[in-house]
Amino acid sequence: MTRNGFAASIFCVSLAVPAFSAPAKLPEAAAILDRYVAVTGGLATYRKFAAEIVEIAVTSDDGHSFGITEFRARDGRRQTQIDAGPSSRQKGVLNGVAWEFSQPGGARILAGTAAERALAMSHGLGPDSWREEFPSAVTRGEEVLGAKKCYRVRLTRKDGSVVERLYDERSGLLLREEFTELDSAGADQPVILDIDGYADSRGLQHPSSMRMTKDGRVFKMKVESVDHSTIVPPDAFVLPHEVVRAIAGRNQNPSAPNAVELADKFIEATGGRKGYQAVKTETVKADVTFKGAGLKGQLIMYAAQGGKQYQSFDIPGAGKFESGSNGDAAWERSVMLGPRLLPGRRIGGGTLGPAAEDVLQWSNSFLRVEIVSKAEVNGAPCYLVQPTPQQEGELATTFCFDVQTGYLTRMTATVVSESGKMPLDLLLSDYRPAGPIKIAYHVETKAAGQPISVDVTDVAVNGVLPDGAFDLPADVRALKEKRNTDAAAESPARPTLKRSHKSGK
């Protein structure tokens, strides 16, 4: 073969082989994730919401079913309730503390890898905050899932745990998530979550039906409801009492008794759990003396379970001051200032100390309680306790428990009224029986620097209360209706998560 013939043959071969083309460049992971945000509702829609609640029905391949309720807030708070009969349990993250609770196993404050994983997963709220949860995101390639071509994205959390996701190239939707969960021994176990369908909730697309493969079993998951809220409801995160006790025990001051033990001692000293549980209604009458002004008025208080309360206080020459709660709305009104709705649903014990119902349910209000120092009230030593509120931004309260008797002898708080925030400092003494419990019959306090004494004159426990004792006055009811209308316009769905197990400890 001549040189020209060889060249010609090479040329012919080159014509027969298709020209080589470099593979198309894969999109960056950030572009894939941001596209998912866009196709499921858009960044602006996601950012309107501060919280969401998701209810899921789960059916295993053996026919067993259970429910999962998840509450998430953009500030990192999480709470999950798994309703599975005797195996029901709860877990969550609140103010940087990760915890678990079950009836047979009790409370556990997570530490080490388990705590790091829970905290790493608590960042942000929805798909729009993926950058907060995953510092690293990388596109790993393309693959086919079913008949759909997908981008595979690897995401790494702050604790180093990895999540692999498959996004449909055509629609931009998430089709599969592969991750690991820690088992009881702390080892990572693989989980695959396949998303079969999407639904709409307030302008956002969310997975509505899924299949989870775990431990060789397949679980069908149906999202029964998704509610979004522009605010975080104040009673959304309620820790089981045992969890609060466990947190308090972890923060124990070695030079003083456990703060939770002081609360227990106070309960026992003033009637015990059975005594407080026996209180269904209360009527308390007291004389209130303004020592500096020489004025004396009468305080009448009605209370019933469910946070219902009414207080009426008559001051000669100044008129009547009222406050109350029907268990759903707290309020106050006076001749001088008119009606006003208060934050929250309850008004607590006011100038008579903590309400009987609140004594047993103190863990509903506090994340933890800690001994701050030793103090003195009326010449007697007491332990000063500083609780941390469940909700960030709530006003601080302190308690001082007598070292010897266990009685609450001092309580400081901040009262929010029409005139603004007012510090409240109560000195409680003269504990005597009031039905099945004991209460302080004498209270010393101050208002605007003026000394005030409160002396209980009559107590009736479980007696008949006046008809309509807790009904909202007409002008207060009008304010509540307006607030409900405004809240509905801003956020029709206001999710709350209630724990199924209410401990009696």
Image: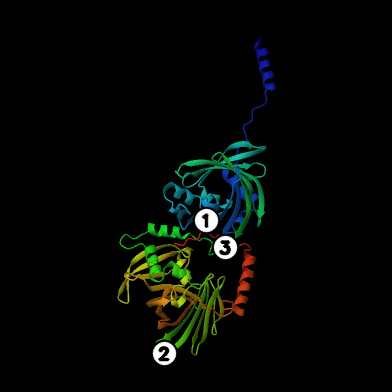
Image position, residue 171 (x, y; %): 67, 44
Image position, residue 324 (x, y; %): 53, 76
Measure how far apart labels 2 and 1 are at the Cα level: 53 Å
Q: Do the CB atoms of the residues marked 2 and 3 lie less than 8 Å apart?
A: no
Compared to residue 96, the image places residue 25 above or below, namely above
Q: Which badge, 3 or 1, comes first in the chain's sequence?
A: 1
- Please tell me which residue lies in front, 361 or 239: 361
Q: Amino acid at mark 3?
A: Ile
Picture residue at 53% right of the left edge, 81% below the top: 322
Residue 193 showing in the rendered view: no
Please tell me the numbered disc located at residue 231. Answer: 3
Q: Do the CB atoms of the residues marked 2 and 1 lie less than 8 Å apart?
A: no
Compared to residue 245, the image places residue 456 above or below, namely below
Is 483 left, or right, of 283 in this rendering?
right
- At label 1, counting other C-alpha atoms closer than 10 Å, the crowd grade (few under 14, some 14-19, many 20 or more) is many
Is 108 left, or right, of 310 in this rendering?
left
Name the residue carrying label 2: 294
Measure how far apart labels 2 and 3 are at the Cα level: 46 Å
Q: Nearer the viewer, mark 3 or mark 1?
A: 1
Name the residue carrying label 1: 79
Q: Amino acid at mark 1?
A: Gln
Judged from the image, the secondary structure of the residue bearing numbered disc 3 is loop
Please tell me the numbered disc located at residue 155. Answer: none
Judged from the image, the secondary structure of the residue bearing numbered disc 2 is loop
- The colour mode here is rainbow
Measure how far apart labels 3 and 1 are at the Cα level: 16 Å
Q: Amino acid at mark 2?
A: Gly
